[in-house]
Amino acid sequence: MVMDAVSCLRAARASGRLAGMARTGRPKAELTLTDQERATLERRARRAKSAQALALRSRIVLACADGRDNKAVAAALGCHPATAGKWRSRFIARRLDGLCDEDRPGRPASVTDEQVEAVVVATLEETPKDATCWSRASMARRSGLSRSTVGRVWKAFRLKPHLADGFKVSTDPLFVEKVHDVVGLYLNPPEHAVVLCADEKSQVQALDRSSPVLPMMPGMPEKRTRDYVRCGTTTLFAALDTATGLVISELHRQHRAAEWKKFLQRIDREVPAGLAVHIVADNYATHKTPAIQAWLAAHPRFTMHLTPASSSWLNQVPVNRPSVRGHARTV
């Protein structure tokens, strides 16, 4: 008898007599959105910086609000139907707040925000009585926290009490004009010209090793004896080509206008005759003597660009001094 009833039911379905009888399931609560909620969900769904989990939840709620069931939403968004049902229910119960992750279980924080604030304020506004700056140990004694906790707070706020840097404010009245002139040469150099940054390093120790230098060999670096004989001091003149990185350098015993003039003559010989020469140098007195001005007037392809006072950072030679010195050793 049971088999006969099943056969009749299958036959009725095949003949279409049960077409008007729709299958029913668990009734879904109606999900409606206000204009403000819809705008917030759409913004979260399309914003590039949104968390992908939050963006997916927003898309699920928007799709459910259009009247689709969980299976249709899951198929359209590539998630499990249970996921769509979960966030549908969460949104209906708690609205927008229900889409955010709940607090994870775990041990409560042992360091409060007030303690962190006290460490940061004390680091920035106070100094210890027996020292010039805070250490992790002294701050730990003052705050009652451990040294590692103090270190983590300083690292999070990028505080380094043991470091001190310096600065210098230029008093040059033409500071802005000179900076525009020099930076303009770097960014947009003139055609058929070479831009050279020139500088001098005086009081360089001239040392002579007491033993010959042992050359580099496989598995062994070059070796030099620590003993040396002082041979006085020397002055390094260097000009750095800002376009190619080539260096023109000379060594002189003294640092006067006469040596600067000899260095300019060396540059005149090294640079091809068809190119104009723009030299960036500081406003040292030897660069502005009458003899130098007369030499520049006799060589019109040379143009001097002086950096503002206390602004050697505009000159590329001091910035790249280690590499310039390395080139000078081979000259």
Image (cartoon, grey):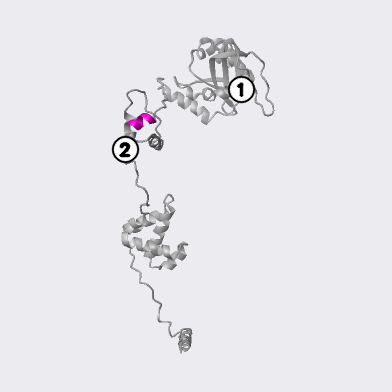
Q: Which mark is residue 214?
A: none
Looking at the image, which is closer to me, 322 or 295?
A: 322
Which percent across, then down, holds residue 242? 56, 27
Q: Is residue 292 above or below residue 86?
A: above
Residue 108: in magenta span = no
Instruction: Please identify the quarter of the rendering in which residue 149 is found.
Output: top left
Looking at the image, which is closer to me, 155 or 20?
A: 155
Instruction: Please identify the quarter of the rendering in which residue 255 is found.
Output: top right
Q: Is residue 304 left or right of residue 120?
A: right
> What amino acid is found at the position of numbered circle 2 in the picture?
Gln
- What residue is disc 2 on? 115
Which percent across, then down, holds residue 115? 31, 38
Disc 1 versus disc 2: distance between alpha carbons? 54 Å
Visible residue check, residue 144? yes
| Mark with earlier residue (1, 2) | 2
Which percent across, then down, holds residue 37? 33, 58
Q: Is residue 205 above or below residue 26?
A: above
User: Which residues lie in the magenta part?
Assistant: 136-141
| Disc 1: CA contacts within 10 A as few (<14), some (14-19) or many (>=20) | some
- What residue is disc 1 on? 327
- Find out whether the residues at labels 1 and 2 contact each other: C-beta distance under 8 Å: no
Q: Judging from the image, what secondary structure is the residue with disc 1 in? A: helix
Visible residue check, residue 297? no
Chief secondary structure of the magenta span? helix
Give the residue at x 49% y 25%. 182
Looking at the image, which is closer to me, 154 or 85?
A: 154
